[in-house]
Image (cartoon, rainbow, N blue to C red):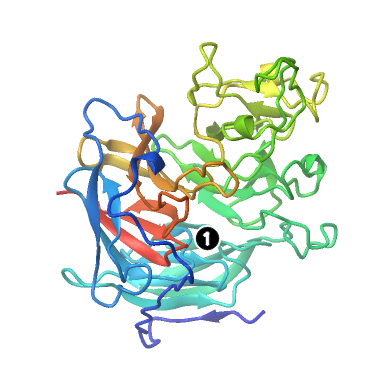
Amino acid sequence: MKIVVRTAASATLALILAACSAGEAEPAADPPAGTVPPSSGTADVAPLAATAVRALPGTGETPFDQDRRLQAPPGWTVTVWARVPSARLLAWTPDRRLLVSRPKAGDIIELTPGQGDTAPAQRTLVSGLNQPHGLAFRGDTLYVAESDQVDAFTYRDGALSQKRVVVDGLPDAKSPELRGAYSHALKSVAVGKDGELYVSIGSTGNVSAEDRDATPERASVLRVPAGGGEPAVFARGVRNGTGLAVDPAGAVWTAVNHRDNVEYPHDRDYDGDGDSDQDRVLQEYVNDHPFEQLARLVQGRDLGWPYCNPDPDLPDGKMSYTGRPYVRDIRLNPDGSKLDCAALPPTEQGMGAHSAPLGLSFATSPGLAGGYGPGALVGVHGSWNRKPPRAPEVSFFAWRDGTLGPQQTLLTGFQNEDGSRWGRPVMAVQGPDRALYVSDDHAGAVYRVTAP
């Protein structure tokens, strides 16, 4: 495939592109309360309030050709800052330009902030890539995770040069042994405090246990020398750790898209008909199990998939996503011989089943305004198969005492009362100006969210 790199001498192109979607449902005047997931906010954070989404000149095409409203912290503003169809993961350059990956288009878009309240200048930084997704900087080196390899570029003054492949042979749909059957081909990349690269490799399918024995191992996070070399498994049992980022203390975290259609694991009645429901797929149980993990990784950590499932259930019938243990998968690990689930360290944090967390980033000190402070930002894409559907949102997890607190909803309202959506956040990052920048691949937009 031809690689085309645009240099600083290239003409800046104003690509004000619209993402059109036929058959979008009309929004409610305000986000319906039933579609807004509860926030587990802290005492120093005010409840969310309705705010109108403001479109800058040139950004008002569908779905912003009609009024859109979101729930955000009181007094915060949400602006359609740029239109980028199929916008996915984000990274700021050393010279304060925002990069946006677009796997479907095979390119990376550069957004250069303008003066005052104007849309950014937009151009294609590099094209001809194979499903580019994850982006990460170390100094003037940009790492790009394609579906089958990780590239390194030298970045200076808006120009890329000296492309080199850091690791190749990563599994994707073109891998001969997979014969086109690969559900999670998109890769993410992060640069650790140790200077090493961390690359998330998704599972082949929903419960494809053979991934744990593959070479290179799938459903894992690999560690690769920054200058290139043989990748090694850093953490396994990570079904689809699309979210990958490094915390303020230097530890690597992942946000995991967990499995679908899990069978009820206990030998007791769940649906109230008097019979045991063990080994049955019950929609009511699947709706909340297993939850999506937000986990701190260390060398050799196992997040259990597909033999152990993180369990949110408390003895009183309520659910929690903080410090939760695992239960054995009744189909794949009924007697615990495949993996001792009780021996796995509890998952630090999480969010509701089928939330579909994608981008993960950390806002470092002083962090977000409005009492939030430092913490993790997660783009929650929303469920595809839950009934009723899990709503998309931007979530915040406060960084306190060297770890993450529980989930708080920071931005929501992308889902209509009937379950249809006009937007789906992918990633949120804090900018050099301390504003929040959010990509949305469904609306084809990048939002700028600012505090008073």
Residue 427 in percent (x, y) is at: 43, 53
Residue 202 in percent (x, y) is at: 66, 49
Q: Which one is in front, 173 or 191? A: 173
Q: Which one is in front, 325 or 169? A: 325
Residue 373 in percent (x, y) is at: 26, 36
In this rendering, would 99 be left or right of 49? Answer: right
Residue farthest front in this picture:
273
Say above or below: 246 vs 414: above
Residue 224 visible here:
no
User: Counting other residues with Cα less than 10 Å from the Cα at mark 1, is it few (<14), some (14-19), or many (20 or more)?
Assistant: many
Q: How many marks?
A: 1
Say above or below: 256 vs 157: above
Residue 69 visible here:
yes
Which residue is found at the position 82% from the left and 57% from the top? 178
Which residue is found at the position 28% from the left and 59% from the top? 448
Which residue corresponds to mark 1? Answer: 143
In this rendering, would 195 be left or right of 210? Answer: left
Name the quadrant of the N terminus: bottom right
Which residue is found at the position 40% from the left and 59% from the top? 439
